[in-house]
Amino acid sequence: MKLIVTIQHPAHVHFYRHAIDELETDGHEVHVFARENDLAVPLLERYDVPHEVLAGPQDSLFGLARVQATYELKLLRRALSIRPDVMTAIGGVAVSHVASLVGAQSVIFVDNEGATSHKITIPFADVVCTPKRFGDDYGAKQLRYDGFHELAYLHPDRFDPSPERLRRYGVEPDDPYFVLRFRKWDALHDVGENGLSRQGKETLVSLLADHGEVFITSTDPLPPSLEPYRLPVPPHLIHDLLYYADLYAGDSATMATEAALLATPAVRIQSFAAWEDDLSNFVELEEEYDLLRSTHDEVEAFGYVEALVSDEKASERWRRRRDRLLADKLDVTTLLTELLTAQAGESRRTRPRATQVSR
């Protein structure tokens, strides 16, 4: 099999890296293409994943359209030379378009209902993989699986946290500390949405600093008052840091999910949480497993944070809840490798046999 994987976000590196290793070990030819990102490309380099960067970052919504066009054109040229059997991505705008032009199967993963980009992606895709409880219906091309994207790399079969890795950077896992994530709001699906205000970020840090160390990871520029709290460990150790943390809070949806799946009490603060129908993965984490608190209201978020840091039994309860979740869910990397291998033999004119590997 010849496979093309595209990467646009650091979480995509984590999602695909175990599958890439397994597929290459089995003799498949894997080509990885990326858009330049503050963390994604360094992570590819850290994990020794050979890759090509096809486009730079965008600095505005207009810039996003320009970068996307450049990225798709360059991806098309490379795909024409490679002639892949399968192309895959999270989100998958470029992959769904390019695969249809080069006779490859496109396998995309989405977990965010209602995104504008789905309108220009789903009609061209061959297989659309979504969590089981995903709210949108894409018909015969949709494969529903019982898991979360993040379980491709945070399932216990894939992730083994290490306190020693943190101690090398001056972090004592047994001491109380908190992880905050602040992100830029410049993606296509972010139009009209927002996260924490500057004042909200400063209030959150002030609230937590009385209880332990505060570590911030941010793609949004930090004000000078918050720079001293910037993350002390390299990006590839963020999951070790999250695992031993006493709390996660911030406006990153991905990291909120990661924290919840690592049994770290998590507070997600972003305007998406104000939707009448919030995204299904967050509803499931909060209502089914009680591993997450979501809100668009900063004052309400501070209340959640204060209650959790004052609760000496919170960590113990979160671990029990996470154990129950893991008993229900898949190792998503296993699903991923089986699906990509199964789709390799399909032609563009044949209905994808996604149900053959459905879990």
Image: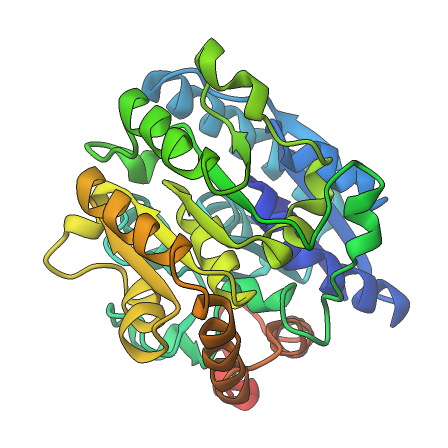
Q: Position of residue 327 (x, y in %)?
A: 53, 89
Q: Position of residue 271 (x, y in %)?
A: 21, 42
Q: Position of 325 compared to 4: left or right?
A: left
Q: Visible in this render: residue 235? A: yes
Depicted 283 relative to depicted 305: above or below:
below
Q: Position of 104 compared to 352: left or right?
A: right
Looking at the rendered image, the quarter that the N terminus falls into is bottom right
- What residue lies at 34% left-to-right and 49% top-to-bottom? 305
Question: Count of labels shown?
Answer: 0
Q: Visible in this render: residue 91? A: no
Depicted 106 relative to depicted 267: above or below:
below
Is 310 in front, or is 127?
Answer: 310
- What residue lies at 47% left-to-right and 72% top-to-bottom? 318
Task: Check the image and name the residue furthest to the top.
Answer: 224
Q: Position of residue 72 (x, y in %)?
A: 52, 34
Q: Quadrant of residue 321?
A: bottom left
Depicted 318 relative to depicted 324: above or below:
above
- What residue lies at 48% left-to-right and 42% top-to-bottom? 211
Q: Quadrant of residue 236?
A: top right
Is 139 in front, or is 144?
Answer: 144
Q: Position of residue 224 (x, y in %)?
A: 48, 10
Is 121 in front, or is 251?
Answer: 251
Query: Colour scheme used in the picture?
Result: rainbow
